[in-house]
Image (cartoon, helix red, strand yellow):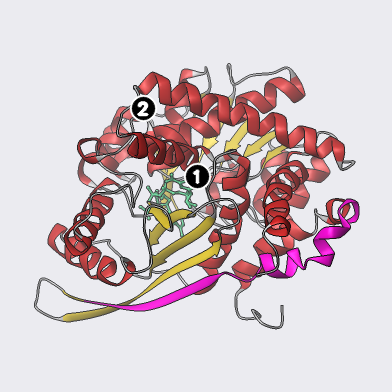
Amino acid sequence: EKRDGDQPEFLQAVREVFETLEPVVEKHPEYEANGVLERMVEPERAIKFRVAWVDDKGKTQVNRGYRIEFNSAIGPYKGGLRFHPTVTESVVKFLGFEQILKNSLTGLPMGGGKGGSDFDPRGRSDGEVMRFCQAFMTELQRHIGQFTDVPAGDINVGAREIGYLFGQYKRIRNEYSGVLTGKGLEFGGSLARTEATGYGLCYYTAAAMRTLRNDSFEGKTTVVSGSGNVAIFATEKAQELGAKVVTCSDSNGYIYDSEGIKLDVVKDIKLGHRGRIKEYADRVPGAEYHEGGKGIWTVPCDIALPCATQNEIDGESAAMLVKNGCTVVCEGANMPSTPEAIEAYQKAGVLYGPAKAANAGGVAVSGLEMSQNSYRLSWTFEEVDGKLKDIMEDIVANSLAAAKEYGHEGDLMVGANAAGFVKVANAMVAQGIC
Ligand code: NDP
């Protein structure tokens, strides 16, 4: 805390994990003897760099780039890149720290990392986004590689940005390799990667509800926040599994559609022309648009799937969800619930699926993309989707087994932290103090 006192998001993420690890550390004195906890909160490498590029008016713009190579005990660093004005070292470190445990939970050999920039792509032309991505990769390329560090997308980094980043890497390094995931299908991408985080979230939620409650999505009113990659495909799969999804949102406001969200309209607005979600209300009679983000959590629902950004549900919003009958919260976004919100879920007996487990589907399919790149082959959509479903169901089963082993039966949060941590900790002990 002394060293990183100016990094609130990072400290929040570490506290949340460490508070639940006490029984694990008690059972494994070798972790303390080997300084595992102290080593795990210090990134192996934290890279911070200047990204200078020229905008459409010929003006030089300067942004800050980051790559946190957090932990490589079980595989090459792996984790997304986020382009958003709120990106700071603290945000990238919290995401990187979570990524260590998340990647471990997938069962695939991937270490933890994360990166990004405070670049705001909103209102930027395609040419500006391309020049920014090229400038960003000009520095990043010296730190990454298919066996070293394999970045992917995150907020505002989708297929377009990954394409520009990959093109620049190839140009500078003269090498065609699986150095990024989330690539286009024509150049090494995996089928089902786009859908993976949202679909995976629903596979996870369905498995947890089935195991712990003998229940399902069928007929459940569901609130989804966001309207980006994760939100769109979470809505698609939840609807397919029988839920009635009644909301979507962006950083300006939210839509309430009592008849159920028409996903083709959302896709047309967001994927078709990068529009604002407000447009939905102009196009769908009966749908309501409300300014501001917090109101979405006052919509009565059975299931809430936050899929926008960190700390979007605070204690007050969580209390409102519970009061209105919500009994399941599974996280598509990273750390969308504040500690006060988590406390409110726990007090009310809400089935709570923490992000590092519930949204691991994206990185899991990224891992499958790396395997396909190494084999130089492509699996079908059904093959990848089937593997994704198995992985998400295993995460639920392994989390519940770990929760039981460490005396917190049925607690998916303690279980995810313990199961993810033990594998990495054992690898760190085996590899010696470094
Ligand atoms: P996108 O950029 O595709 O979408 C993000 C969505 O969240 C947009 O609707 C955006 O609205 C909204 N949003 C962003 N910032 C804020 C904010 N400060 N307040 C309110 N709404 C906001 O990103 P993804 O869907 O990929 O990512 C969403 C979350 O899921 C993130 O937490 C990410 O880390 C996490 N995640 C993503 C994975 C992936 O595979 N993509 C994997 C695992 C986790 P607007 O357009 O107005 O900015």
Residue 65 point in image, percent of width and height? 37, 72
First-in-chain label (2 vs 1): 2
Which residue sits at x=68%, y=36%? 324
Above or below, 331 relative to 58: above
Which residue sits at x=24%, y=63%? 133
Q: Is residue 56 visible?
A: yes
Disc 1 secondary structure class? loop
Q: CA distance from mark 2 to mark 1?
A: 17 Å
Q: Is residue 170 magenta?
A: no
For residue 307, the mark is 1
Q: Is mark 1 within 8 Å of ligand 1?
A: yes
* Most foreground residue, 81 or 281: 81
Q: Is residue 30 magenta?
A: yes
Residue 87 point in image, percent of width and height? 44, 68
Q: Which residues are magenta?
A: 26-52
Residue 258 point in image, percent of width and height? 47, 28
Above or below, 75 relative to 384: below
Report the quarter where the N terminus lies. Answer: bottom right
Q: Quadrant of residue 397?
A: top right
* Most foreground residue, 116 or 6: 116
Q: Which one is closest to the eye, mark 2 or mark 1?
A: 1
Label 2 sits on residue = 262
